[in-house]
Each structure stands twice: as structure tokens, then as C-alpha cells.
Image: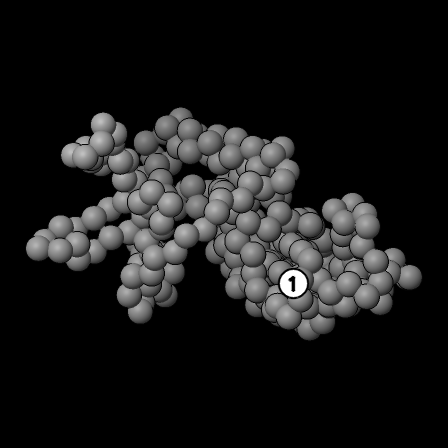
Amino acid sequence: MIIQNPFFNSKLIIMANIKLGAIITDIAGSVGGSTFRRTQRGIICYNKQGRQIKSAFAKNSVKNKLGAILSSWSFLDSATKQDWSDLAPLYPQKDKFGGDVILTGRQFYTKLNAQLIPVNQVVDLNTFNDVVFLGVVDSVSLDMGANNFIINFSTTINTFFVLVSVFPLRSGGSPKPTKHAFPTYADEPGNKEDINIFGAFLTQYPNADIGQTWGVNIRVMNSSGFQTSVQSFSVVAE
């Protein structure tokens, strides 16, 4: 939407969805420097300065792979597209308020394949697998002296992928999942109940030292992109 300012020779570009009545009754999006967001408690307006991800290479790499996934849908044959459309209603997704959302076949295809980006895999309908990992993470420990960053599971991981994001924990903060955290470790460790991600951790944070506190988010995902819920921990480097 573009609004002509009657007092100045300029235009205000509004990137928001607005419902008009006698007053503005509903709004979501950005207007100027303000962002309006709908929540369960009402509309929240806030100003937040944008932040660029430091690693432009990592950022662009994910963007390129997502673009390739979106483009690949058009190259699927009609029968395969119909298979995805038939599968989508069987797996409703949760929106940010916890409600069920039925995706289209294309959306479902894109979502599952996008979640596999960190492990460089694609979903194969011939081996479609909707069985998720039923175990939990029992403990996380970081021993710098012994070169150990151990994640211990309650049961064998077997054929699932493990995705771990490690990030510096703010003072007084909690290990809350970070939406844009780049995976520190993403692999299929095999038939194990614990994994040591120290090498991957030190590659990402070569200046890590004893006494630092880290947030750790852990996801387990099957070969079709179905994930268990994120488990979060905080760990002090010993």
C-alpha cells in the first residue's frame, strides 16, 4: 500500500495488512519503523533494529538451498505432486498459537525438505518415514580438559539425525531455543546412546574457555524431516 502525504511531496510505503473501519481495527506487519504483531493477548507494537547474521556465507547457503527446494516442486510429475497432496492432511502442523493447520501438498513437501537442509538430504517418498525418535536427552556435559562435549540419550539413536545448536548464554538468561541458530552439529551418529560433539563445537567456537556458560538446543529428526520437540539445556564449560 502507498499513501500520498497531503502536506509533503512524499509517499509513505506501508508493508502491513490493515482492516479499516471507523478506526483501524486490525493490523499486522511493519509500518515505517514500527512492527505490529498479533498475539493471543492482542496486538503488540514494537521497534526493533534489524540484525544481520554475521556469516553471510551460511545465510546465503541456506537461502539458495531453500530456493532450490521451492523450484524443484515444479519439476515433480503429476502423480508425485498428488501423493504429497494426499499426505499433507494426514500430518496437520501447529501454528504459533498451538492450533492445527493443514498444509497444501507443496507446503508439506517444502517444509519437510527444508528441515533436512542441515544434513544435506531430501525426502524420498519411496522410503517415507513418519516414525519419530521417542527418547529424550538425559544429560549434557562439557569438559574442556578432556575434549568432551557429551550428549547422553535415554535410548539408542539408531537411524535418526541429531541436530545440535550451541550458543553463548547471556548473563542471567535461559537456554531458550534460538530461531536462527546455525547448527553446531548435524549428523546421523548411528547406533549410539551418547555422542561427543567437542570437535564441531571447537570448530565453531575456537576461543571457548573454562567457566563459560553455553545454551544447547537439541533436535532429533528422521530421514523424512519429522522432528521431535526441541530440548534445551545450559552447560558450564569445566
Picture residue at 19% right of the left edge, 35% below the top: 7
Quadrant placement of the C terminus: bottom right
Give the number of callouts.
1
Picture residue at 36% right of the left edge, 49% below the top: 34
Q: Is label 1 in a helix, a strand or a loop?
A: loop
Question: Residue 174 location in percent, x, y?
Answer: 61, 69
Q: Nearer the viewer, residue 178 or 79?
A: 178
Residue 36 appearing in the image: yes
Q: Nearer the viewer, residue 55 or 134?
A: 55
Quadrant placement of the N terminus: top left
Q: Which residue is mark 1?
A: 170
Residue 224 appearing in the image: no
Q: Nearer the viewer, residue 222 or 138?
A: 138
Tell me if residue 178 comes above or below residue 138 in the rendering: above
Extreme-front residue of the structure: 7
Extreme-left residue of the structure: 22
Tell me if residue 137 comes above or below residue 93 in the rendering: below
Question: Residue 14 location in percent, x, y?
Answer: 27, 40
Question: Residue 208 location in percent, x, y?
Answer: 80, 54
Left or right: residue 87 compared with residue 216: left
Question: Residue 67 location in percent, x, y?
Answer: 46, 31
Type of amino acid under label 1: Arg
Left or right: residue 119 compared with residue 73: right
Which quadrant would residue 118 be assigned to in this image?
top right
Picture residue at 22% right of the left edge, 32% below the top: 8
Picture residue at 31% right of the left edge, 69% below the top: 41
Tell me if residue 172 comes above or below residue 77 in the rendering: below
